[in-house]
Image (cartoon, rainbow, N blue to C red):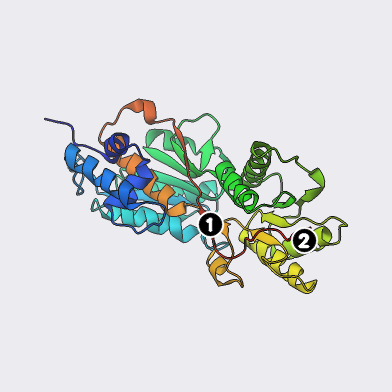
Amino acid sequence: MTKRATMVDVAQRAGVSQATVSLVLNGVSNPRVSDVTRARVMEAAEALGYRKGPRHNVPEHRRPVIGLLIDEVSTTPFAMPFIEGARDEAALQDILIATFCTRSDPKIESAALDLLQELNVIGILYTTLTTRQIVAPERLNDIPTVLVNCYDKHRRHPSVVPGDVAGGHAATEALLKAGHRRIAHLKGEDWIDAAREREKGYRQALTTWDVPVDEDLILMGGWTVNGGRELTLKLLDRQDPPTAIFCFNDRMAVGAYDAVKSRGLRVPEDISVVGFDDEDLASYMVPPLSTVLLPHDEMARWAVGALLDHNEGISSHRTTQKIKIECPLVERGSIAAPLAP
C-alpha cells in the first residue's frame, strides 16, 4: 500500500512551511500567503494526491481525541488562538480536542493525563502561555507529545515556538527602512525568553544596517502600560531623544502613545512606535499600531499536524525538532520618516 501523503510531504514539494500548507489547504485567509504561494501549495497537494479526511490508521480501539494541557487561559488573550487553532485543525480530521487548564500544577496535570489515557488519546499538546523552557512530566514520554510555546532542555519531544528573534529584527528593520537611526527599545524583563529574543533581533537589525547600538536607548521596565509610559517619558526627557521606539509588547506601546501625547507630540509625525503581539487593541489605537503578530494559531495547527504525522509513522528523526514559526510584521499607521534635523 502506498504511504498516504502528509502535509510535511506537501510542504517539502512546494518549498514552504507546514504551517503555510495548513493555512492554504484549510482555506484560512492570511495576508502573509500570496496567491502564487497558494497556487504552488495546491499544485503540490494535487500532484501528491493529498486528501484531507480522517486518519484511517488510527487503531479502532482508540477514540479520536487529542489532549491539550495549557497552564493558563484567563491572564491574557493569547490562550484562545492556541485552543481554536488546535480545535480547527483537528476537526478537519474528525478528531476532538480535550482542553485542560492545569496552572502547571503536577497534581492537576496527572489527573488530566489519567483521564486522557482512559480515552486512549492519540497524543498530547503540552502548552504554555509564556514561551519558556519546561521540565515535561515524565509520563509524557509514553504518549506522543508536542510542546507548544515551550521546549524541553533534553529535547525529548518536538516543540514549536514563535520566531521572536526574527520578529524583533523585522520590527526594527521597518523603522530603519523608514529612515530612523536613533531607535529605542523598551525591553521586557530578562527572565522572559521572548524579551531576550526580541532584544537580540533588535540588536541584529541595527548591526545589519551598520547602526551603532546605543545602550542608553535600551530600557527595561516590564511589560505593562505604565511601564511603557514611564520609560518613554525618560526617553523624551533626553537632550537627544530617539526618533522611534520598538516596544517589547503592544501594552508598552499603549503607554508610549500616552507619554508622547502628554508632551504635545504625535505618533508618527514626531516619533514612530512599533509594538509586538498584535493584540486586538493594536488596530483600534490612534493611529493604528504597527506591530508583530504572534502566530499562536499556526503553532497549534502545526502541533496537531505533527502529532498526526507521528501517528502515521513519519520518520522518527523529526521527533526532537524545535520549530520556530515566523512572526510577521503587521504595518499600520504608526511609522513615518523622521523629522528633518
Q: Where is residue 113 in the image (x, y as percent from the top left)?
A: 41, 46
Give above or below for 327 relative to 310: below
Could one spot residue 289 in this view of the protein? yes
Quarter that holds the N terminus: top left
Q: Residues within 10 Å of mark 1 (few under 14, many from 20)?
A: some
Quadrant assignment, res 213: top right
Residue placed most toward the observer, 84 or 28: 28
On screen, residue 121 versus residue 247, left or right, reads left
The image's mark for residue 232 is: 2
**Where is 12 relative to 222, above or below?**
above
Q: Distance between the residues labelled 2 and 1?
A: 31 Å
Dot 1 falls on a residue whose secondary structure is loop
Residue at 21%, 37% in the rendered image: 5
Residue farthest to the front? 340
Query: In percent of the image, x 66 and y 62: which residue is there?
Result: 253
Q: In this orientation, which residue lies closer to the viewer: 249 or 159? A: 249
Q: Where is residue 269 in the image (x, y as percent from the top left)?
A: 69, 67
On residue 233, which mark appears? none
**Looking at the picture, how far across and down is residue 34, in whole percent?**
36, 51
Residue shown at the point (41%, 46%) measured from the top left: 125
Question: Mark 2: few, some, or many residues within 10 Å (few <14, many ≥20)?
Answer: many
Amino acid type indicated by mark 1? Glu
Pick whichever of labels 2 and 1 is earlier in the sequence. Answer: 1
Q: In which quarter of the image is residue 211?
A: top right
Left or right: residue 155 compared with residue 182: left
Image mark count: 2
In the image, residue 266 lies at what x, y percent?
Answer: 71, 70
**Which element is circle 2 on?**
helix
Q: Looking at the rendering, in which quadrant would you find the C terminus?
A: bottom right
Check residue 72 in the rendering and tell me which mark sits there, or answer none.
1
Q: Which of 51 and 87 is in front in this view?
A: 51
Q: Is residue 189 above or below residue 81?
A: above
